[in-house]
Structure formats: structure tokens, C-alpha cells
Amino acid sequence: MTKQAACPSVNLRLCKKCKICINICPKKVLEPDENGLPHVIYPNKCAACGLCAAHCPDFAIEIVPPPGAGSGEDYTE
């Protein structure tokens, strides 16, 4: 069984579109939509380093287990 990395979850209601998370991500997991809101586009590339969450001034990002992780699958944080 392969380990899946946790990835960011963005609360779009709290986000102020500063793009710090997009710019700081070393794996370029997040990309802005047409309105400038960040979205996780490449979850499999996420290293779960937490830089996006740590630098978000709006506390709009948290690192969460991938879908299905509660069903016995291994994941990395």
C-alpha cells in the first residue's frame, strides 16, 4: 500500500486572496482560480510541509489527511 501525503484544505470564506500560499508552496500545489482564490490543483505533489498554512495571515489553510485516510490507509504528514 502506498502512502498518500496529506494536503492543504483552503477555507475560501476566510481567504483574502493574498496569494502567499500559492507563492510559498515549493511543490506548486495551489493555483488561483479566475477570482484569485487558491485551489489545490495537484494534491499528489504535496509534501505536507505546512508552509502554506503557517504563512496564511487569514488562518484559512489547514493540512488534512487525503480522502479515505480514515479507512485504514497510510498517509504522511
Image (cartoon, grey):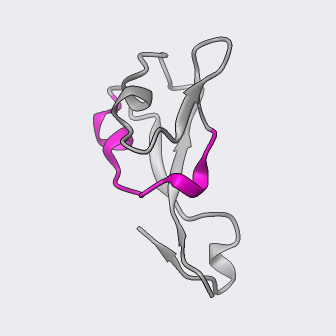
Give residue 32's position: percent from left, percent from top.
58, 22
Give residue 35's position: percent from left, percent from top.
64, 11
Give residue 41's position: percent from left, percent from top.
63, 40
Q: Residue at x 56, y 35 (%)?
A: 11
User: Quick one: 8 or 14, which is closer to the camera?
Assistant: 8
The C terminus appears in which quarter of the rendering? bottom left
Give residue 70's position: percent from left, percent from top.
64, 77
Q: Farthest top residue? A: 35
Q: Which residues are magenta?
A: 41-56
Q: Is residue 14 covered in magenta?
A: no
Left-right relation of 48 to 57:
right
User: Quick one: 2 or 7, which is closer to the camera?
Assistant: 2
Left-right relation of 49 to 32:
left
Q: Residue at x 54, y 78 (%)?
A: 3
Please say if 43 is above or below 37. Answer: below
Left-right relation of 53 to 60:
left
Total count of labels: 0
Q: Residue at x 61, y 63 (%)?
A: 66
Please say if 43 is above or below 57. Answer: below
Q: Image quadrant of residue 51?
A: top left
The N terminus appears in which quarter of the rendering? bottom right
Q: Residue at x 41, y 16 (%)?
A: 18
User: Quick one: 12 or 26, which is closer to the camera?
Assistant: 26
Q: Is residue 42 covered in magenta?
A: yes
